[in-house]
Amino acid sequence: MKKILFVFSFLLTFSVLFGQQTKVNGHKDNVVGPFNTPQEVTKACLECHEEAGNQILESRHWNWAEAPSKVKDSVANLGKKNLINNYCVAVSSNWARCTSCHIGYGWKDASFDFKNKENIDCLVCHDQTGNYTKTPTGAGMPDTKVNLLDVAQNVGATNRQNCGNCHFYGGGDEAVKHGDMDGSLLNPTADFDVHMGGQNFTCTECHKSENHSISGKSHGSRTMGTGTDVNCETCHIGEIHKNKTLNKHIETIACQTCHIPTYAKEVPTKTYWDWSTAGTDATVENDEFGKPTFDKKKGHFKRGKNLTPEYKWYNKSASYYQLGDKLDPSKVLVLNLLNATIADKNAKIAPFKVMRGKQPIDAKQNIVVVPHLFGKEGFWNTYDWIDATNKGMASVGMTFSGKLDWVETEMNWSINHMVVPAKKALKCTSCHGAKATLMDWKALGYPGDPKKAGNREKLGLVK
């Protein structure tokens, strides 16, 4: 009898420490506080979860970059923290605003210590109260109104809201950056998203996590050929369609192409951002969605809703524009050029949101510049492009000639969410036939509709 009681006691203790019991009462029994700073919360977390600290320090979510690897002719660790985009352009010199979505505390400048475990924000990913928020301009620090003890006592496995608090709001507002991720995914119907609505998936159902490393291609991993990919075929194996022709399509057509016929279905997403008018006194008007088309701090915008993706060959890799790369100002600069073509056996036709914009460049050096936007001396307060550019370029160890110009840019954002069930997927006639207009077959490298006799044969390709 004593042995039975001992075993029961051991199993109960094990379940409390490793998850079974914590699902019932959170951490109320083993987190006592009080906590005066969020770092004190992290210190308490690491007392039990010792291994988590080292795991986070190695992750892309923490470093916003890949591990060092050879790119072009040099070794680099590329990622969100040092690549250019056509939203707010760059993280550097704008840290406190951009890093409000970092999984850490206090990344306010270039001196941030990425080896300090106590600056890891455990709560942002594991809060179950729904009350944990970060200050939008606070370099990752939580809002002072947050009850740290209450949140720390109520943590658990990540959910859609945890991930969405940052990923739904990239670019400064809801649905700005990602056209396929916004608050509509918190409680969708099955027709809106077959996984999150139909089966109540959390993000980690697909983005598997091991040792706090979350699978999925980031900006850096697409450039450097690293990172663990997320594929529909991981779960949907073999001949998943009853129709043999559809099964054959899987060889060259991404699942998302047919099963995400539209994106930004509920919340309009930004599609164009013109920085060249920022700082002027243009007239503020609202678009059809009731959103302003102009902001003196940021210039003119365009948005769209219920949009059809643009289709391109994709092999999960891209070549990113890097600071200092020369450009041709007479041409559109693609900030993340997709590496695949019709000749690539590993490529599939996939859907994209193509973000277009106009952003500042050094007119003499013909390079994209980094503007200092946020802060007392930033452009958003001074409206002085020359001073803001001087400060921003200095933050990345580069100089500015003093002469500014503008270049049109594009950025490809893959569409992977808002997956519809089969009944709402694209039909054969959406892409093929005399009346089909969805696919630009010539832009994809075909002489015409590949279903038409002879078009594939003209290429000498199986595709």
Image (spheres, helix red, strand yellow):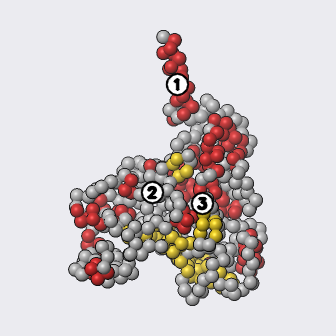
Q: Nearer the viewer, residue 377 or 316?
A: 316
- Mark 2 residue type: Val
Which residue appears at 59% of the width and 34% of the height? 27
Q: Is residue 149 left or right of residue 255?
A: right
What residue is rendered at 25% in x and 76% in y? 451
Q: Which residue is mark 1?
A: 12
Give the residue at the far bottom of this rendering: 330
CA gap, disc 2 to disc 3? 17 Å
Kind of residue indicated by mark 1: Leu
Estimate the x, y position of residue 431 in percent, counting from the top left: 30, 74
- The reply to whether dot 2 and dot 3 touch (C-beta < 8 Å) is no
Q: Which mark is residue 230?
A: 2
Q: Please state the horizontal and vertical placement of residue 173, each as a whole percent of the image.
A: 57, 64
Comparing labels 2 and 3, the label whose residue is closer to the camera: 3
Mark yes or no: residue 70 visible.
yes
Tell me the CA gap for discs 3 and 1: 40 Å
